[in-house]
Image: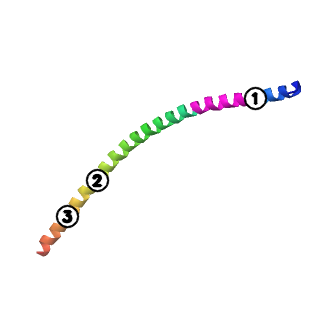
Amino acid sequence: MKPELWIPLMSFGGTLAILVVASIYNNSRLTDLQKFVMTFMTELLRAESGKHEANIRRVEELLLHKFAEVDDRLNRIEAKLNM
């Protein structure tokens, strides 16, 4: 081959090698970022689900209390009407 062709081919090969190494390095950093984000989101969801579970328990207690009140009222009405 002529020496005039070596320079563009070596430039292209060097550029290609740099791109391959950079993409491999960037991919490893993205994997680390993905692991960090997944860990963070998992912890956040666990914390939020705990808050929601406590709120649901509170609402369940309130509803059970209200149903007991309604049942008492109904029993009193039935007793007055001798049903």
Front position in the image: 53 or 77: 53
Amino acid found under the numbered disc labelled 2 = Glu
Kindly state the secondary structure of the residue where label 3 is placed: helix
Magenta-drawn segment:
15-29
Residue 71 circle label: 3
Tag count? 3
Which of the 4 image quadrants contains residue 27?
Answer: top right
Pointers 1 and 3 in contact (C-beta within 8 Å) = no
Secondary structure under the numbered disc 1 in the rendered image: helix
Q: Is residue 76 above or below residue 3?
A: below
Overall secondary structure of the magenta section: helix
Q: In this view, does 71 lie to the left or right of 58?
A: left
42 left or right of 68 in image:
right
Q: Does residue 32 appear to the left or right of 81 in the view shown?
A: right
Q: In which quarter of the image is the N terminus?
A: top right
| Sooner in the amino-acid sequence: mark 3 or mark 2 | 2
Residue at the image point whose x is 30% and y is 49% from the top: 58
Residue 13 - label: 1
Is residue 10 covered in magenta? Answer: no
